[in-house]
Image (cartoon, grey):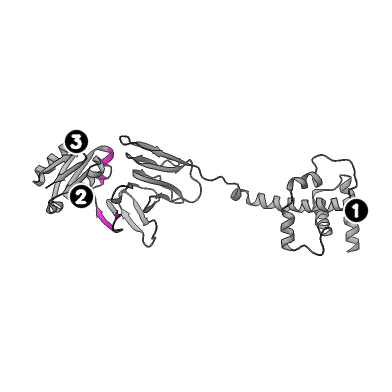
């Protein structure tokens, strides 16, 4: 121990002359930090020393320029050595963990549409999103990590770029939708009684946001609806051509029930449709509609299904 002490004292004299290597500085520091403590340092004591200023360490023990040889009192050397330990430990910890602790939070952009506008958004991965009227989408400036995640309120059609290593997730207030690469439509307007997910191509997984007890797997032509009031799900088949109907104005109804037709018309024309005669709901109709007013569409439907109706502002009454 005495020989080791003499050796270290000799190293410290070399340090005062600016002749020691970085490795020798560390060796000196390990000795000096004990000089300023009673017995061996505990983990808690070492933690306290780590709270000392890293800047002071650089100033006292790692000067940028070689200073003139000066003999410091032992207590100053002890403090400097303590700071060296802090610098060594902090430096190693920082560089080993830099990516974790200095990664900036993911910045989110927000896109909103008015009552008469539709917007197309292309994300950093090439995914294309068509945002319907009165809708909002939040998405990152760029994707990083294991997943690609966006947040939707309203309606949007997604054409997701395939990436098996990074699933694409859409979060709504009630449902979470996950895909690898496919096209699908989500209707999740806060004021609507029902939310729906319709698949135009590929496969989609849908999970309730709160009670993640089950994931519904949908394939091309599947539509999953969620009733906000009853909190129940229903699954049905839809014409793929109609999934994008709100973008094109083209509807193709092949033996569709009047109830399903009314549901699609409500979303597209933003109207309320009331049935006074409930027996009409199950009536099946085949009809093609292309870029026509709600009044023209109702006239065509009333002839095919043999019912009467009236339009009162944004409300359609059928009997």
Dot 2 or dot 3: first in sequence order is 2
Q: How many labels sit on residues?
A: 3
Q: Which mark is drawn over residue 251? A: none
Which of the two residues, 204 or 52, is positioned nearer the viewer here?
52
Dot 1 or dot 2: first in sequence order is 1
Vertical side of 76 occupied by 134: above or below: above
Mark 1: secondary structure: helix
In this rendering, would 281 be left or right of 179?
Answer: left
Q: Which mark is drawn over residue 293? A: 3
Residue ID for mark 1: 10
Mark 2: secondary structure: helix
Mark 1 vs mark 3: give the one in front: 3
In this rendering, would 133 be left or right of 317?
Answer: right
Q: Which mark is drawn over residue 260? A: 2
Q: Position of residue 131 (x, y in %)?
A: 35, 40
The CA span between labels 1 and 2 is 91 Å
**Magenta region:** 226-247
Which of the two residues, 156 or 115, is positioned nearer the viewer here?
115
Is mark 1 in CB contact (under 8 Å) with mark 3? no
Mark 1 vs mark 2: give the one in front: 2
In this rendering, would 165 be left or right of 279?
Answer: right
The CA span between labels 1 and 3 is 95 Å
User: Given the current orientation, which residue lies at the most extreme front position?
Assistant: 312
* Residue at 14% in and 46% down: 318
**Magenta stretch: includes residue 243:** yes
Mark 3 crowdedness (10 Å alpha carbons): few <14, some 14-19, many ≥20: few
């Amino acid at each position: 121990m005495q020989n080791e002490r003499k050796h270290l004292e000799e190293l410290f004299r070399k340090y005062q002359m600016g002749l020691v290597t970085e490795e020798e500085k560390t060796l000196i520091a390990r000795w000096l930090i004990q000089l300023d403590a009673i017995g061996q340092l505990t983990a808690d004591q070492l933690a306290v020393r780590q709270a000392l200023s890293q800047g002071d360490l650089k100033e006292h023990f790692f000067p940028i320029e070689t200073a003139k040889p000066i003999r410091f009192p032992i207590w100053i050397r002890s403090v400097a050595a303590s700071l060296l330990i802090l610098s060594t430990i902090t430096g190693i910890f920082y560089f080993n963990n830099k990516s974790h602790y200095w990664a900036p939070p993911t910045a989110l952009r927000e896109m909103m549409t008015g009552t008469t506008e539709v917007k197309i958004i292309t994300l950093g991965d090439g995914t294309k999103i068509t945002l319907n009227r009165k809708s909002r989408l939040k998405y990152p400036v760029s994707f990083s990590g294991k997943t690609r995640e966006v947040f939707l309120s309203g309606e949007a059609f997604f054409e997701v770029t395939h990436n098996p290593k990074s699933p694409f997730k859409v979060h709504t207030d009630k449902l979470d939708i996950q895909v690898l690469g496919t096209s699908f439509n989500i209707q999740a307007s806060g004021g609507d009684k029902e939310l729906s997910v319709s698949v135009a191509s590929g496969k989609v997984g849908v999970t309730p946001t709160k009670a993640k007890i089950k994931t519904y797997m949908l394939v091309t032509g599947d539509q999953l609806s969620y009733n906000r009031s009853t909190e129940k799900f229903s699954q049905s088949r839809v014409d793929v051509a109609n999934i994008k109907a709100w973008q094109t104005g083209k509807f193709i109804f092949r033996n569709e029930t009047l109830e399903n037709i009314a549901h699609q018309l409500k979303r597209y024309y933003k109207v309320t449709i009331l049935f006074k005669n409930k027996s009409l709901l199950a009536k099946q109709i085949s009809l093609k509609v292309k870029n026509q007013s709600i009044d023209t569409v109702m006239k065509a439907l009333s002839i095919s299904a043999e019912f009467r109706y009236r339009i009162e502002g944004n409300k359609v009454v059928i009997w």
